[in-house]
Image (tube, rainbow, N blue to C red):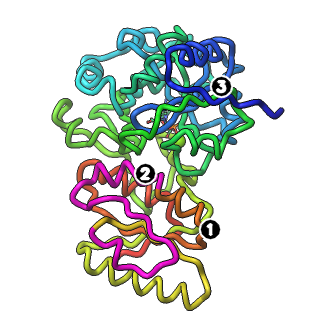
Amino acid sequence: MQKNTEMLSSIDEDLAKAAQLIRDGGLVAFPTETVYGLGANALDPKAVSEIFNAKGRPADNPLIVHISDVSQVYNLSDEVTIPAERVMEAFWPGPLTVVLPRKPGVPDVVTSGLDTVAVRMPDHPVALGIISRAGVPVAAPSANSSGKPSPTTAGHVAEDLSGKIDAVVDGGPCRVGVESTVIDLTQEPPVILRPGGVTQEELEGVLGHVETAASFAEDYVGAPRSPGMKYRHYSPKAEVVLVIGEHADEITQKVSELLAKYHCQGKITGVLAAAETAAKYSSDAVFNLGSRECPEEIARSLFYGLRYLDMQGVDIIISEGYSEKGIGAAVMNRLKKAAGSIIFL
Ligand code: TXA
Ligand code: MG
């Protein structure tokens, strides 16, 4: 059924409206510091199942439950350990999702039947304003069609979900630009299931050694612990080719060679490039992600750039690779998942 998707702003009156829609079982997209989320009342299984329909998301990929106050975590899990309390204290509100044993009251549709629940307190006044006014925990995946790059503006959400959800709250572009880090605290040592806005280095500062899930590796086969990791992700319409190398010079040379080859084949090309090299390419379209020296800037503009190049109607997007240090781990994880092919120099 086609819905009339209301565009709301971040004024108090609109936040109250968004919260009421959520309490009434509706679907509302709202900004967080990472990406836009598509929220529903986490305690209402019917509303949550509508999230899966709107996104075209496989039912075995569980959702993150968003809260507006740390104390609400105890309603969702009764095994909040001391390490869990320490990371929540250090990084909440913020781009960190903790996986904890779940209480039976958390609906199966939220956790895809797992005995754990993923919880996060976002660092965005609009998200917090809506969740606190709704008075319920809010299940929210990224507000994109399943498989597409995550949305970092209200316009991206509308592109994918207009007519399928009740409202989009526009709070401007997202500050972090990649999703939260998901850490499984039911394992010892804890395991990073998805790299994101909080870096491994930062987590280790609080928790000591943490592992990264084996499924980060390109050659990983087997049952992923975080079900979301097995699906194709972040893919624009265009084919993505990722060029990974030690030195910016060799990357630039390879990207230029590929551009020449694709032009010869009559393909329309787009390049996702760092500020330092963007001007060097003769491509139909180039998107400047920001300086290599500022990985936070690259992270912030990554999904925007993928969607921008798609809008230009390119056949192929060639992306430069980046260092995996800090938030670069999240950037490279998303690029590798978006890429149909990866060239290692
Ligand atoms: O930054 C974010 O995390 C954004 C904003 C909206 O908060 N949300 C987001 O949600 O990225 P989503 O649904 O796109 O990604 C959630 C990830 C998936 O990889 C999913 O498999 C994993 O979290 N996940 C959820 N519950 C889990 C659980 N109980 N155990 C392991 N992984 C879980
Ligand atoms: Mg997602």
Label 3: state its secondary structure.
loop
Instruction: Specify the label residue 215 is tagged with.
Output: 2
Q: CA distance from mark 3 to mark 2?
A: 31 Å
Can residue 227 be seen here? The reply is: no
Residue most toward the right?
A: 1
| Residue 188 position (above or below residue 321) | above
Q: CA distance from mark 1 to mark 2?
A: 32 Å
Q: Is residue 280 magenta?
A: yes
10 Å crowding of disc 1: few (<14), some (14-19), many (20+) = some
Q: Nearer the viewer, residue 217 or 278?
A: 278
Determine crowd level at label 2: few under 14, some 14-19, many 20+ residues with C-alpha closer than 10 A.
some
Residue drawn at (25%, 20%) of the image:
89
Of circles 1 and 2, the one toward us is: 1
Q: Quadrant of the N terminus?
A: top right
* Residue 245, image quadrant: bottom left
Residue at the image position 54 percent from the left and 20 percent from the top: 138
Give the residue pinned by disc 3: 27
Residue 145 in picture, x, y percent from top left: 64, 45
Left of 265 or right of it: where is 337?
A: left
- Kindly report the distance in space between the C-alpha atoms of the residues bearing marks 1 and 3: 30 Å
